[in-house]
Amino acid sequence: MQIIVFNTADDMYSKALQLRTDVLRTPLGLKFTADELKKDKADTHFGLIQEEILVACLTLTECADERMKMRQVAVSPNFQGQGFGKILVAASHEHARGQARKIMFCHARKTAVPFYESMGYKVVGAEFFEVNIPHYLMEREL
């Protein structure tokens, strides 16, 4: 297993974008917009590789304060439930700490709340809708 960090100029980005599309957008009947993809250029992207296959990915967005936003966490359906998402999230925490960040936050799909709670995240605020489904703002001290 290998964790890699990459940007939109790397070959791995297209694989991660396909995984994000397959897991996060297609089931909702959505596609990424040009504006959403443009935002990716300023972000840091993580991938978890096992036997030369990208099995999970996530994106970190820098914030102006001591916070960092984790978004677009996706695990290939064939590899879900095996702890790969947690391994990748832990790696993103390490990266954020190295950037002197003190809080990691995300907009978690309602169905993913237990996943984040198992890693110490807390729900902050009321349910809201994003990409047409319920989400919660969740955060965790690093």
Image: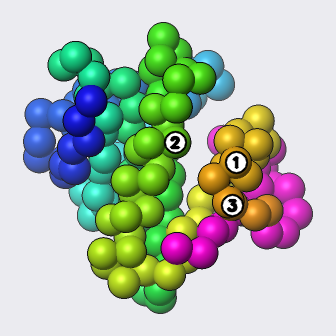
Answer yes or no: is residue 39 visible.
Answer: no
| The disc label shown at residue 121, or none | 3
Choose between 44 and 56: the one closer to the eye.
56
Q: Position of residue 61 (x, y in %)?
A: 40, 65
Mark 3 or 2, nearer chain start: 2
The verdict on residue 141 being magenta is yes
Q: CA distance from mark 1 to mark 2?
A: 9 Å
Mark 1 or 2, nearer chain start: 2
Disc 1 on helix, strand or loop? loop
The verdict on residue 59 being magenta is no
Q: Which residues are magenta?
A: 124-142
- Placement of the N terminus among the 4 image quadrants: top left
Q: CA distance from mark 3 to mark 2?
A: 12 Å
| The disc label shown at residue 86, or none | 2
- Please report contact status of discs 1 and 2: CB closer than 8 Å, yes or no: yes
Answer yes or no: is residue 55 visible.
Answer: yes
Residue 80 picture quarter:
top right
* Amino acid beneath label 2: Lys
Q: Nearer the viewer, mark 1 or mark 3?
A: 1
Q: Residue at x 31, y 35 (%)?
A: 48
| The disc label shown at residue 17, or none | none
Q: Position of residue 69 (x, y in %)?
A: 50, 65
Q: Position of residue 7 (x, y in %)?
A: 19, 51
Neighbourhood count class around disc 1 (C-alpha, 10 Å): few under 14, some 14–19, many 20 upward:
few
Q: Residue at x 76, y 36 (%)?
A: 111
- Please report contact status of discs 1 and 3: CB closer than 8 Å, yes or no: no
Q: Which residue is under mark 1?
A: 118
